[in-house]
Image (spheres, helix red, strand yellow):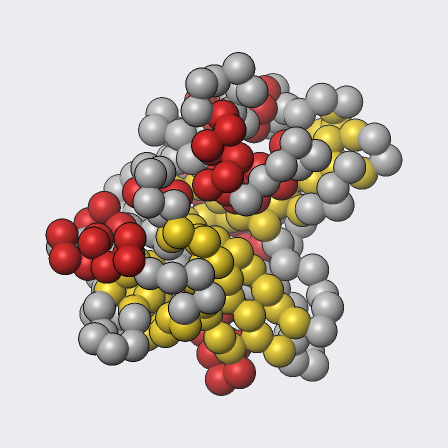
Amino acid sequence: MSDIRLLVAWQNPQNREWIPIGNLYYENNLYKFCYVEGVRKAKEEGFTYFTNFAEMNDLESIYTSPTLFPQFANRVLAKSRPEYERYQKWLMLDSSSTPLEELAKNNGVRVTDNIELYKIPTKQDKYIVEFFSHGISHLIPSYQERVKSLQVNEKLYLMRDLQNEYDNNALLIRTKDPMELVGYVPRIYAGDFTKLLGNASLRVKQINQDSPMQFQLLCEFSADWVDGFKPFCEEEFESLA
């Protein structure tokens, strides 16, 4: 079973800020979930146990289950769905992929709530994160067409969106020549990416022309893992358990 650890985040529907609320992982044959410090802020801004995490109302507990918790299991696509094989290809998964590996790629997105999940990078020589470009549906049509014409391994570039009213750390993704926008970095990663921009690279991992826009452009961000760097090191990411 995968040793992936996922960060669970909740979006404030009023200001669209993403706030970390917990960690999900698999250990000793059990799925485990614990809250992080950010859940206190999320509660103040409208996150409720009843609508999102019924029965998980103790902030300092580690919850365990032999099967994936229902509030996460319903974000994994059923293998009986007719589009399942195409979906696997879009996410670069195979028959051996675990539910947590799937959630790391699809981010557990559902239109019925404001919860998403993101992989927590593990320490190695390189800091590497694969992610789908966000916001493609909001781009002008010519930029959306540019996304479809990208090539695997094509180099991409990041630039700060300094006037973004929702996120001070927002990072736009662009091409080189001509310079065209092809989306955004997921907000939860933008802060850490910014710290590593000095020795980082970004490339096209895969293009899915026949997929929904949320799965069209799979990117890979890579940077040297500098001494002293720790992903998600701010207080809001600290476990409460």
Please name the residue shown 34% across and 51% down the image.
Answer: 134
Foreground pick, 36 / 44:
36
The furthest residue to the right: 28
Q: Quadrant of residue 145?
A: bottom left
Across and down, in percent, residue 40 comes to 51, 44
Across and down, in percent, residue 195 comes to 50, 76
Please name the residue shown 25% across and 77% down the image.
Answer: 177
Foreground pick, 211 / 229:
211
Q: Can residue 134 be spotted in the picture?
A: yes
The furthest residue to the bottom: 198
Please name the residue shown 47% across and 18% down the image.
Answer: 81
Q: Quadrant of the N terminus?
A: top right
Please tell me whether residue 99 is drawn above or below residue 161 in the rendered image.
above
Across and down, in percent, residue 158 comes to 36, 72
**Relative to 221, 161 lies left or right:** left
**Relative to 225, 83 lies left or right:** left
Across and down, in percent, residue 191 comes to 46, 67
**Relative to 173, 42 lies left or right:** right
